[in-house]
Amino acid sequence: MSGQSVLRHVVLFQFKDGTSEASVSKIENAFRALPGKIDVIQDFEWGTDVSVEGLAEGFTHCFFVTFASEADRDAYLPHPDHTAFGAVLSPHLEKVLVVDYWQRT
């Protein structure tokens, strides 16, 4: 990835009130499994909010997916494994925020 720009796909989740820790863990594991199932994913990282600023507006989880091109991102979005992940997520999702950008250094 060094020396060339990559496409970052940033996804933030806010879960519905009452979503159990077990459900959240299942969602985390399902998202973390996607790089092993979808070969256009170049890199992947994730974490939960630890900010002390109090500006997260209920978003607790951030997932960061890297693609080489818009075509790779566009192949990822309707991919059957991504769609299956959405089925695991959707009953528990209150709100989602997605930002895609070309990485700059």
Image (cartoon, rainbow, N blue to C red):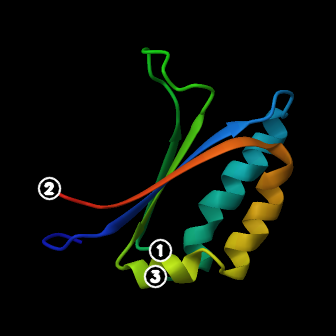
Quadrant in the picture for residue 51: top left
Helix, strand or loop at label 2? It is loop
User: Residue drawn at (74%, 64%), measured in percent from left and top?
Assistant: 85
Q: CA distance from mark 2 to mark 3?
A: 21 Å
In this figure, what is the number of numbered marks?
3
Q: Residue type at mark 1: give it.
A: Ile
Is the residue marked by circle 3 packed among few (<14), some (14-19), or many (20+) residues within 10 Å? some
For the N terminus, the quadrant is bottom left
**Residue 87 placement (x, y as % from top left):** 82, 63
User: Which mark is first along the chain, 3 or 1?
Assistant: 1
Q: CA distance from mark 1 to mark 3?
A: 8 Å
Q: CA distance from mark 2 to mark 1?
A: 20 Å
User: Which mark is first along the chain, 1 or 2?
Assistant: 1
**Residue 35 placement (x, y as % from top left):** 55, 71
Q: Nearer the viewer, mark 1 or mark 3?
A: 3
User: Please, is residue 27 above or below residue 54 in the view?
Assistant: below
Q: Nearer the viewer, mark 2 or mark 1?
A: 2
Foreground residue among 67 and 71: 71
Helix, strand or loop at label 3? It is helix
User: Residue drawn at (48%, 75%), measured in percent from left and top?
Assistant: 73
Q: Is residue 5 left or right of residue 40?
A: left
Quadrant in the picture for residue 71: bottom left
User: Please, is residue 4 above or below residue 86 in the view?
Assistant: below
Q: Residue type at mark 2: give it.
A: Thr
Q: Disc number at residue 72?
A: 3
Determine which residue is flagged by label 1: 41
Q: Residue type at mark 3: give it.
A: Asp
Q: Is residue 13 left or right of residue 4?
A: right
